[in-house]
Amino acid sequence: MWQQLLHRYLRLPYRLNSYEFRSPAQPSVTIVLLHGIGSSLGMWQPLIAKLPRSARVIGIDLLGFGASPKPAWNVYGARTQADSIARTLFSLNISEPIILVGHSLGSLVAIEFAHRHYPFTIKSLVLISPPLYKPDRHPKQFDPKPEEVLRRMYALMAENPDATEKVLRLAGKYYLVNKGFRADTVNVPAYLASLEAAIINQQSYQDILKIKQPIHIVSGQFDAIVLDETIRDITRQQPNVEWTRALGGHEIAGAVRVATIASISKAAKDTLTPDN
């Protein structure tokens, strides 16, 4: 009862589950890792050894996933996630510059956080496989634009939760998704709510155009979820955006993993230069 009063009615953000992968005595920067939809902070484990040794590295379970709270009533929008991340980071007593890294849904949450909580926290962003779609308030019934096709696909998943759950469990069983995805514990209501609030009805495209700090985008050349045309449009408008395309798909594996590590390392190095 008290939890619902505090978080639902008084809108106090949740404190999320976090884990410090690395805690040097005198960290140069703090790297905060936000996983993708349906996953958890465990997905970052294969990257940790390759990240800068002087960095403090923290993984966070987004609201509704991993070991973080999973309130059934929540809308799971990017703003709700960003507010909870803000409370969580505040509780961790971070004094170093922060590099915020997000994969898929996590990248949209990172954009929301940087847009609303900058300038006193985030120095740069690394966005991996960001599903950024341009807004279209009045799409045609059979609109062929890629973002509308993807929105219809997401909406179909939301309308058929039982089928979606089966597909997610099969994907986890046959290792078609990243390492942090647990097929036996996937929270389908949170998954579908996140699709609806943070991806289908996103504001991320508009918000990324307002961010001034450096942004590094990494995407796979065969990623059907990421729209190259949209990212290309963003890079034309935003000189602070650097885009790397690697051989691979949506998950952080192979060449995409190599490019992700390189982008995080570059962001950390740039953060410590005199101009930053």
Image: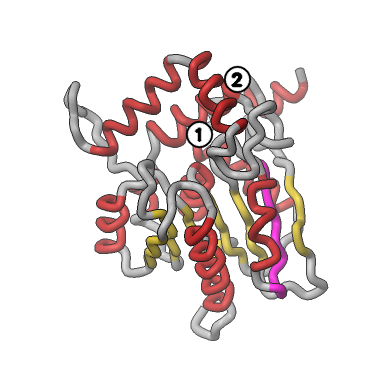
Where residue 106 sits in the image (x, y, percent)? 53, 46
Q: Residue at x 37, y 68 (%)?
A: 240
Label 2, label 1: how many angstroms apart (C-alpha)? 12 Å
* Residue at the disc numbered 2: 73
Placement of 253 over or under 147, stated as above or below = below
Placement of 81 over or under 96, stated as above or below = above
Where residue 77 sits in the image (x, y, percent)? 50, 34
SS at mark 1?
loop
Disc 2 packing (10 Å; few <14; some 14–19; many ≥20): few
Per the rendered image, the range of residues in magenta is: 53-62
Which residue is situated farthest in the front direction here? Answer: 174
Quadrant, the N terminus: top right
In the foreground, 6 or 190:
190
Instruction: Please give the count of numbered marks on the rendered protein.
Output: 2
Where residue 39 sits in the image (x, y, percent)? 61, 39
Q: Residue at x 38, y 61 (%)?
A: 245
* Residue at the disc numbered 1: 77
Placement of 46 over or under 30, stated as above or below = above
Which residue is situated farthest in the bottom direction here? Answer: 274
Residue type highlighted by circle 2? Trp
Disc 1 packing (10 Å; few <14; some 14–19; many ≥20): many
Residue type highlighted by circle 1? Gly
Horizontally, residue 154 falls left or right of residue 30, namely: left
Q: Is residue 117 visible?
A: no
Where residue 2 sits in the image (x, y, percent)? 77, 22
Horizontally, residue 145 falls left or right of residue 49, namely: left
Q: Answer whether residue 102 is magenta in the image.
A: no
Q: Is residue 23 visible?
A: yes
Badge 2 vs badge 1, beta-carbon distance below 8 Å: no
Q: Residue at x 70, y 22 (%)?
A: 5
